[in-house]
Image (cartoon, coloured by chain):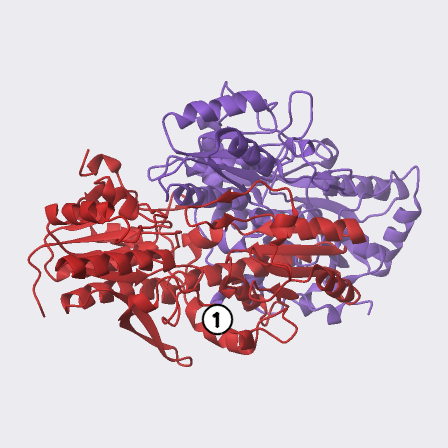
Chain colours: A purple, B red
Amino acid sequence: MEHIRGNVIVGQSGGPTAVINSSLVGVFKTAKDRGAKTVYGMRHGIQGLLEEKYVDLSDHIQTSLDIDLLKRTPSAFLGSCRYKLPEADKDNGVYKKIFSILKKLDIEFFFYIGGNDSMDTIRKLSDYALEIGSSIRFIGVPKTIDNDLDITDHTPGFGSAAKYIGSITKEVIRDGLVFDQNMVTIIEIMGRNAGWLTGASALAKCEDCEGPDLIYLPEIPFDVESFIKKVEELHKVKKSIIVAISEGIRTPDGKYISELTDTVEFIDAFGHKALSGSAKYLANMIGAKFGWKTRAIELNTLQRSASHLVSRVDITEAYQVGGAAVKAAFEGLTGQMVILKRVSDDPYICTTDTYDVHKIANVEKKVPREWINETGDFVTQEYLNYVKPLIQAELTPIMVDGLPRHLTLNDKNLKNI
Amino acid sequence: MEHIRGNVIVGQSGGPTAVINSSLVGVFKTAKDRGAKTVYGMRHGIQGLLEEKYVDLSDHIQTSLDIDLLKRTPSAFLGSCRYKLPEADKDNGVYKKIFSILKKLDIEFFFYIGGNDSMDTIRKLSDYALEIGSSIRFIGVPKTIDNDLDITDHTPGFGSAAKYIGSITKEVIRDGLVFDQNMVTIIEIMGRNAGWLTGASALAKCEDCEGPDLIYLPEIPFDVESFIKKVEELHKVKKSIIVAISEGIRTPDGKYISELTDTVEFIDAFGHKALSGSAKYLANMIGAKFGWKTRAIELNTLQRSASHLVSRVDITEAYQVGGAAVKAAFEGLTGQMVILKRVSDDPYICTTDTYDVHKIANVEKKVPREWINETGDFVTQEYLNYVKPLIQAELTPIMVDGLPRHLTLNDKNLKNI
């Protein structure tokens, strides 16, 4: 094992997950165990680093209790960003600044926990380092509830979100049965272009629950008329109909359902539209057409921040990918992302490996067509075989005075203040 | 102790809660223990009973595991209804039908688990029984997440909903801090006329969380302009602002905020408007005015069906009020509701008693003005002292294959099929 003479820095980027802090702990603890002097944490990712906002993680994670609380703390402990680096050949001022800060902090290894956009950051920084002959190593740690990263079998964060969605869908279905009345409930689930999360609503179909009746993934064009017809048919055999839709379903001519409404929209730094309101739109349409009671349920941010209901498999793997990133850097790698490699479904066995980040950044992995049924309104058993191992077992929240306890970053210890 | 010679029937009515089935278990088990031959369950409350839809609960609750699963099953196991009995002097046909069915089933004790409207049912049926000289005893079992029943210190169902709201608010607040950006998050919480649930968002204010910034209860008229001003002021000192509002907040001239929108609305059998969209409306308004990112989060049905996160105090009390109802009937009472009497806050001690249902039915208990701060935008310490004991401790879900397991009523055992 190579020895480290300098310091380590780690950042969190992109949308939060319920287990992203478990990866942070994995990086922190493994780096410390392997002799890193200081493990810095970027405040709000690369964006904060550019303003020299960072902390010494040892000031904030001091005890074993801190570590256990941090694993159970939702959302990015260090704060996150959606900052896209310019191409270095067009604007290398930002790169010069970043590398001068890294030099000042005597950074040897740089870890970035995130999704597609964050891997783009690792790609660019590692390329630039090679270009200027810097020995700093850049390793990506996968994270996203969306599960849309390529090469890796799945991403940490997805399993817990899937478990949350499956559990909540069961509770919503049961709630929908309470009154003896005609009702259509539409659950809107995150995942703009990939239906991994929406598919997870199918987990609710089990021995004690019928599961949702229809599931619409963004991979398949959404035909409003055909949807209405299916609901009408279903209604002949049951009163309470449950439909799960992705926030990103689009009409055959490419329009988001939410674009058919007047909802105010925002566009983030990556040009993503902030969507909402598709479930509401469809629910209102059905209510107006048939006179049935309808309900639109947006799972919203809870699906990415529900640390009170995480998968132990997921939280353990989140920790492992953090540790594996440190190991990879120690072994001399750079420009790589840690990936999860599934050895078998049953029993579920999964290991880590690393992969060239150039082949991962900016690629969106979608649900394969053959994992969606022919009529495009449910997932197949293959999908369920894939997702089921990822939602297994729990990590009990640490409850204090009736509520889940989290670890909080105290900004008074911010290094540049 | 008096002996029972006949049978018992129990129904669930009104909106579901996460612990209403614990009360059902309390009635069932106590009645069986005290010698009831058959404990019938009405399918969908009095409405189902009128169609002679009922089950023998012993067919469905057979083992100790069934009991433990049922306690953890959200929403009304037997199904519920929102059926308002006519006044007996205007239309006694319905009453004749009910009493003939009860006679046929040899019912001695009748239990109804519900809120205001359900207690109205108990009132009318017990009055009618006295009028016609029937010896059937009618006892109400309190239930509602809204906590708006009079006389009882609180209602089973409220504590778990409050615990859920407090926990989720913490997770939402943390999620709101993830990006270093201006953001206003508005959480919309159930409770049409009483702000008990909305106030529970204040529980999030604890050692590891700042809590929401503003809380608006329906007890206080909501001034949109003053709200905007407060948000603008807050924004000068912090970037992520969290506001909790009741779905029922109204402008000084009595208009629901959601009525200012184009949202399709429904009106239920009791004339209640199905509200939604107030948070969305306010979020859009702020987004348009200031250009900040905004987010509207409707907690929706989850706050009443999240059995995966219940208060053990609540689920225990829900069981106790069920048992106490049976005890009251055995002791010869009728036309009564079981109430919870708080003996002390700290240590929390609470007992049961019974109270004349005539004085409870159709009365809505609101949050006292002195438990809301002077400026009408937060709750006071008195409110928190009241609610805190009710959210304490947990009842771990029984997790099977990664998801919470529930007990399902198999309609094939419906007695009239």
Q: Residue at x 31, y 54 (%)?
A: B21
Residue A21 position within the rendered picture, expressed as x and y whole percent measured from the top left: 61, 55
Can you tell which quarter of the image residue B24 is in?
bottom left
Count of numbered circles in the view: 1
Q: Residue at x 69, y 64 (%)?
A: A57
Q: Nearer the viewer, residue B327 or B138?
A: B138
Q: Residue furthest top?
A: A374
- Locate the C terminus of chain A by quadrant: bottom right
Residue A200 position within the rendered picture, expressed as x and y whole percent measured from the top left: 50, 37
Q: Is residue A70 visible?
A: yes
Residue B266 position within the rendered picture, expressed as x and y whole percent measured from the top left: 51, 42
What residue did someone put label 1 on?
A401
Mark 1 element type: loop
Can you tell which quarter of the image residue A408 is in?
bottom right
Q: Residue at x 55, y 66 (%)?
A: B219
Q: Residues within 10 Å of mark 1 (few under 14, many from 20)?
A: some
The type of residue carrying mark 1 is Asp
Residue A392 falls left or right of residue B174: left
Residue A111 position within the rendered picture, expressed as x and y whole percent measured from the top left: 72, 50
Residue B16 falls left or right of residue A39: left
**Looking at the picture, does residue B325 appear above or below residue A233?**
below
Residue at mark 1: chain: A
Residue A66 falls left or right of residue B417: right
Q: Nearer the viewer, residue A146 or B290?
A: B290
**Looking at the picture, does residue A74 appear above or below residue B380?**
above
Q: Is residue A32 visible?
A: no
Residue B309 falls left or right of residue A125: left
